[in-house]
Image (cartoon, helix red, strand yellow):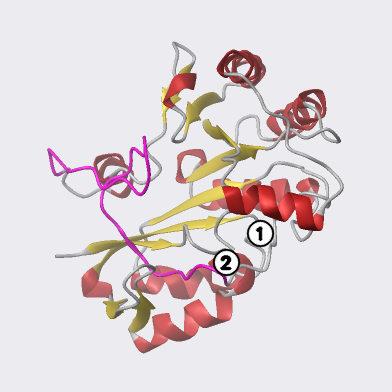
Amino acid sequence: MKQIISASRRTDIPAWHAEWFMRNLEAGGVEVKAPYSGKMNTVSLKPGDVLGFVFWSKNYRPLLPHLDKIEAVSRNLYFHFTITGAPPTLEPHSPPFGEAVRDFIHLARRYSPVHVMWRFDPICITDRYSFEKHLEVFKRIAGRLEDHARVCTISFVQTYAKVLRKFKLQSDQAIEELTVGQKQDYSGTLAETAGKVGIRLSACCNDFLLSDRIGKAHCIDENHLAKLWGFPALAPVPYAPTRKECGCTRSVDIGAYGTCGNQCLYCYAT
């Protein structure tokens, strides 16, 4: 059975491992360690075994020169593009959001606005970086992406113990504890702002945000991708959630935790 290849939820392959990805693509396969068992598995990247590629990144610039070669394996591509405009104190190695927006528009023009998902997540509000600052940059990004984006996925930062330790050890700022009501109010404001430029919000693993203006995110949805990529839909496709309230269907992730160079302060994967 052909598989959807996720590259990757666990690390930013386009930004930091584009050459590694291309070497494995040319070799026709990649060895992937299971994150919990440690077992090594071989994942085929041969054209006959790949249904399509779903990429996740904050910076696609290193991958852009390789798109023709990737399309030789599969023309079925989908891009999650995280652009938050957060300061270097939170995202030390993300490109300036103006540069990221230009690359987003390049991908949207090459494929289509529905092939590229804008992610404004996680929303990390601290005593140094307020919601108002988030909203200001969100308005600027949304305005630039008018006619180039259809959906924006949001979520609020998960305050895992490892995340709180990183803030304590590596930063002089602290995550603000928000009530459910505050998060709903904030997300409603973002939904209203995005709606003015034709962008609808979806919530990833934050079902308490769902409303008539905010839908549930299905970041990898095989039936949606079937329509987008032009192959027969398979109904029903079983969900394969990666965490609580995840709406994804099946895919094979080829990344590895602890290998991302973005070093975002709020990240739980490093």
The structure residue drawn at horizontal position 51% and vertical position 49%, both measured from the top left corner, is 80
Does residue 109 appear left or right of residue 25 in this picture? right
Locate residue 246: give its quadrant. top left
Q: Are marks 1 and 2 in contact (CB under 8 Å)?
A: yes
In the rendered view of the protein, which quadrant contains the C terminus? bottom right
Magenta stretch? 234-258
Judge from the rendering whether residue 30 lies leftward or rightward of residue 203; answer left or right: left
Q: Is residue 247 magenta?
A: yes
Residue at image location 77% in from the left, 49% down from the top: 90
Location of residue 93 in the rendering, given as x and y in whole percent from the top left corner:
76, 61
**Residue under numbered circle 1:** 59
Asked where in the image residue 199 lies, by quadrant, the reply is top right
Callout 1, which amino acid?
A: Asn
Instruction: Give the CA distance from mark 1 to mark 2.
Output: 7 Å
Task: Give residue 77's position: percent from left, percent from top.
Answer: 41, 57
Query: Per the image, is 189 magenta?
Result: no
Q: State the count of labels.
A: 2
In the image, farthest residue toward the bottom: 27
The answer to whether residue 135 of the structure is visible from this angle is yes
The residue under the point 63% across, 72% down is: 16
Circle 2 residue: 14
